Image (cartoon, rainbow, N blue to C red):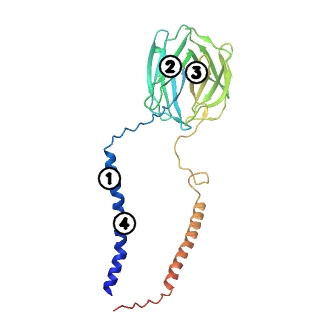
Amino acid sequence: MKQDLTITTFKKVFQPIFIFVVLFITLLIPGYLFAQADSTQKQEPATEQESSLISPSLEFVSVQKTDNTIDLKVALKAKFKGSSIKLPLLKTSFLLITDTAEKELGFVITNSEGKAVLNVKADVLTADKEGKLHFKAVFAGNKAMEATEQEVTIKRARLEITPVKEDSLLIVQVKLIDVGTGTETPVPETVVGIFVHRSFNPLKIGEGSTDENGEATIEVPNKLPGDAKGNITLIAKLDENELYGNLEAGVVQQWGVPVSDKSQELPRALWSPHAPLWMMITFIILICTVWGHYLVIIIQLFRLRREEPEPDSPTVEHIS
């Protein structure tokens, strides 16, 4: 009887394993032979489909400063899969184009925002007979992107800013002068804006139009927040002019309200990172109450488990 039981157990355990091994060998050998037969044939190299290059866009502007230097600013972007992406760590070269040749001014590498600035000194700039400067920004491209370039033509000019304080009235006088022909000529009927420097973008606080002398007067609001000493940076701007492009002049004045730049611990309040004590105590009591109920339920479940009556153990009849 024990021998029959052993044979039956052997069949139940090893018979499925034996069937699986036979099926595996049956399926593996023809596939292996087929692979060996195909390996003798010559395989043609797979042709990769050439992907189209990315076409970047190059934004190029020039900003004339009060010290007669010029900032050449670029921003590289591209559209990829329906969204606009910024292109960092790319080289952009700048050229000054004259009637006879192209003079290389230098190059910049774009930052994480895809932007870069090159400051050009006045002694390397040569204007044409009309007092104009012709700049070119060139991105040579790479394995993934096409080459692109942009050109800007501006006439030489200068923007001056003078702060004036009369009693409680704060005034800024702005003067726009054309210096392209070698002589200073006032530029009338041109709108100039006044901005105050802020952490992200300058804040516009007023604008005015120049008179026949190229001058404009703009009032500055009182009680503007400044630094720890009350200093504010006032900026006069001429934006996107057809003839002169962009001009900028700045001055620092102690016309603001002092704002401390020291990091101090905020008091306990609803608007600060430090919550009031009554709120923290209430929160802790509520959390303890909720989790206390869960703990009582778990303890009761274990207690019911222990008090559950054990079933009688079945009798086992031994076959002799």
Q: Check disc 1 and give the amino acid type.
A: Leu
Mark 1 crowdedness (10 Å alpha carbons): few <14, some 14-19, many ≥20? few
Residue at 61%, 22% in the rendered image: 240
Q: Nearer the viewer, residue 145 or 308?
A: 145
Mark 3 or mark 2: which is in front? 2
Res 170 quadrant in image = top right
Q: Earlier in the sequence, mark 1 or mark 3?
A: 1
Q: Earlier in the sequence, mark 1 or mark 4?
A: 4
As measured in the structure, the alpha-carbon distance from the residue carrying label 1 to the one carrying label 3 is 79 Å
Q: Which residue is mark 4?
A: 20
Image spot of residue 212 (x, y percent): 68, 13
Location of residue 7 with respect to 118 vertically, above or below: below
Mark 3 crowdedness (10 Å alpha carbons): few <14, some 14-19, many ≥20? many
Q: Nearer the viewer, residue 150 or 264?
A: 150
Q: Which residue is mark 3?
A: 247
Kindly check if marks 3 and 2 are in contact, taking CB atoms under 8 A apart as contact: no
From the image, which quarter does the N terminus lie in? bottom left
Residue 136's label in the rendered image is: 2
